Amino acid sequence: VQLQASGGGLVQAGGSLRLSCVVSGRTFSTYNMGWFRQAPGKEREFVAAISWSGSSTSYAASVKGRFTISRDNAKNTVYLQMNSLKSEDTAVYYCAAARTAWGGLAVGRLSEYDYWGQGTLVTVSS
């Protein structure tokens, strides 16, 4: 399984970006998916997660109401729509896939995820 994240870039504070993560393989629809981010000098942190069907989502408090995670199982792709971006959102964003059933998944725990993408850089200028 390979994950390829894209869509990062430079944006002004208050602007928007949409990240995409394409997952190779035929079993994408069985994975719960997550987005994490890592700012310079900081640990990687949870941003958002979505269940395999798309019916359940979870967000970090810092992004709730501004970011939206979604997925298209026909395209093997998970998205992160980021609105009202702030300078503190600057980070490398990573997508990740988890095989654990949604009900038993600790969405914010890095070790719960089995596969990781390479990351895409988001820079928000103030």
Image: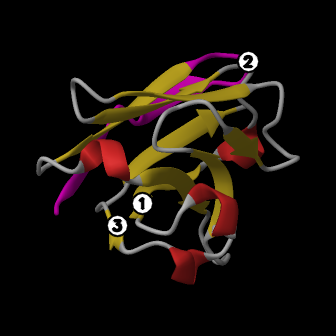
Q: Earlier in the sequence, mark 2 or mark 3?
A: 2
Q: Give the residue type at disc 3.
A: Trp
CA separation in Å, label 3 and label 1: 4 Å
Secondary structure of residue under mark 1: strand
Q: Quadrant of residue 94?
A: bottom left
Q: Does residue 62 appear to the left or right of 125 in the view shown? A: right
Badge 2: how crowded within 10 Å, few (<14), some, or many (20+)? Answer: some
Looking at the image, the residue that sits furthest to the bottom is: 111
Identify the magenta region. Answer: 1-16
Residue ID at (48%, 35%): 53
Q: Which residue position holds label 3?
A: 116
Location of residue 27 in the rendering, given as x and y in whole percent from the top left corner:
21, 51
Q: Does residue 2 appear to the left or right of 71 in the view shown? A: left
- Looking at the picture, tell me which residue is in the foreground, 125 or 67: 67
Location of residue 52 in the rendering, given as x and y in whole percent from the top left corner:
46, 43
Q: Which residue position holds label 1?
A: 96
Q: Earlier in the sequence, mark 3 or mark 1?
A: 1
Q: Give the residue type at disc 2.
A: Gly
| Viewer-side label of 2, 3 | 3
Residue 14 circle label:
2
Q: In the rendered structure, are the residues bearing label 3 and label 1 in contact, judged by CB atoms less than 8 Å apart?
A: yes
In this rendering, the answer to whether 96 lies above or below 24 is below
